[in-house]
Amino acid sequence: MPRILVVEDDGALRFDLTQTIMEWGFETKSAASAVQGLRLVKDWKPHLVLSDIFMPHVTGYELKQQIRKMNIPATEMAFIFITQLHHSQIDFSSSDVDPNEYISKPVDYRILRTKIDTALRGIRSSQPIWGKMQPRVC
């Protein structure tokens, strides 16, 4: 079963995201900060990290950089950022920034589900053991 880590400092949104993703049939854990999230990445090894960008102390961008420094390639762990920024406010010129990695707040759960499925397909296509997994659709 695909594992999804939710990293969000807003407790209500973190709870809502975690519950919804669990209802979709994914194994889910959550963290209130990037520091907690990094610890879970090391211990639990999620297939996807869904992270807020603007959090106290360590941002979602910094979290992603720290994970990549652990030599976990994008083919093994995908990222989706949650942001209050509009797409027009994000600089997509960097090779490390993919427009498909973003979802705006307030979260549209239909779009989130599509982005999760797309991200996990990229992971599954690089790992044969994922071929048999079919997440439940709500």
Image (cartoon, grey):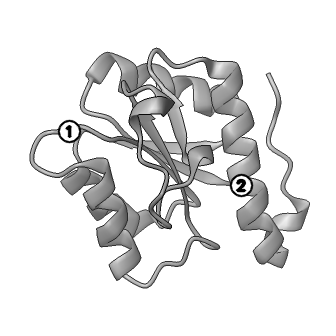
Q: Quadrant of residue 113?
A: top right
Going by the picture, which residue comes out furthest to the right?
A: 132
Residue 53 percent location from the top left of the image: 32, 41
Q: Which residue is tagged 2?
A: 120
Mark 2–mark 1 Cα distance, whole angstroms, equals 25 Å
**133 relative position to 26: left or right:** right
Q: Is residue 1 visible?
A: no
Nearer to us in this view, 11 or 58: 58
Q: Which residue is mark 1?
A: 55
Amino acid type, residue under disc 2 in the picture: Leu
> Dividing the image into 4 quarters, which one contains the N terminus?
bottom right
Residue drawn 90% across the image and 61% down it: 132
Using the image as rendered, state which of residue 97 and residue 76 is in the foreground: 97
Residue that appears at 53% across and 32% down: 103
The 10 Å Cα crowd at callout 1, few under 14, some 14 to 19, many 20 or more, is some
Point 38% across, 20% down: residue: 13
Marker disc for residue 107:
none
